[in-house]
Image (cartoon, rainbow, N blue to C red):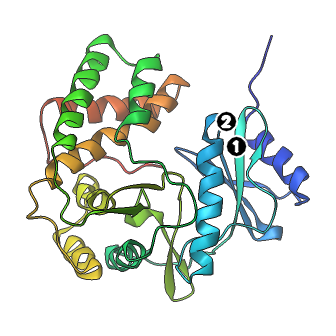
Amino acid sequence: MTTTASPESAARRACLAAGLPHRSLTRLHEHATTVFLLPEAATVVRVGSADQGQALERAIALTRWLCARGFPATEPADVPQPFSTGTHTVTFWKHYPQPDGPAPDAGHLGAMLRALHALPLPPVPLPEFRPLASLEQRVAAGTSLSAHHRAWLTDRIEELLVSYEQLDSPLGPGLLHGDAYPGNTLWDGSSARLGDWDEAAFGPRELDLANTYQGVRFGRTEQELERFGAGYGRDIRDWPGLPVLCRIRDLHTLGSYIRRADAGDEAASAELVRRLESLRSCSDTGVWAPAH
């Protein structure tokens, strides 16, 4: 009988291999990845799936390049990485202690994306952005989806991919963060940094902006959207392609819930069904629970 190592055991194995102390390893949160803190090493340990190895290797190389150019990306720890345990891929990052009070707002993210999109292409091979590719795999392999939800998702993905191929991009293609939204920003003293580079790619720059506008699903306010547009230097809410990208993002958020529901997470399963039903009813007004 084969057993799958837990994210915690994978993190401890990787810490040993990197020469980092692991007795104080503390879980911070779990969603698409499981994140731990090593307080005595001032290091964050992120544990992803085994098939993320190439993407995480790219994230490490890209963020090292970005930091060297002065861009405020979260900084990888100075250890050999990523580390593969066979069942997981582990990366190590500098820890940025967060003060009490609000996180960086959407205006900070807008300014960082403006700077990111002005950079030349990095000397790191970037995949072309393929919307909903990972979700297609989740839907096909998922065991927790009902037959009618699976059929609806399959049809909806196909429909949105057709619409995506017909979009024109006023901002043009370039380096994408791929998962840019205010929740992926951190304080570093009085300035902000942008983290979670696992989905970096090459594609239409509007993709990096749509995630924040889609955030009305999570209660983002008109004032936040205005600050985001001001930070970026352009508000794309009048661009006719934005609704397509926001609907793609709506579906993208389901992937981690399908994975967690397949693993028996009842809370994730309930939120997955809630989101699916609101999407099937074409409701744009229901506020979804934030990821945790």
Instruction: Point out residue 19 in the picture as x, y percentages from the top left corner.
Output: 91, 59
- Indicate the quadrant where residue 283 lies: top left
What residue is drawn where x is 21% and y is 36%? Answer: 160
Asked whether the residues under the numbered discs 2 and 1 touch, taking CB atoms below 8 Å apart as contact, a structural biologist would say yes
Give the farthest residue toward the bottom: 190
Look at the image and tell me whether residue 278 can be seen. Answer: no
Name the residue that disc number 2 marks: 50
- Indicate the quadrant where residue 239 lies: bottom left
* Mark 2 vs 1, N-terminal side: 2
Mark linked to residue 89: 1
Total tally of numbered discs in the picture: 2
Mark 1 element type:
strand
Mark 2 element type:
helix
Instruction: Identify which amino acid the numbered label 1 is placed on.
Output: Thr
In-image side of 72 versus 166 (left or right): right
In-image side of 171 versus 38 (left or right): left
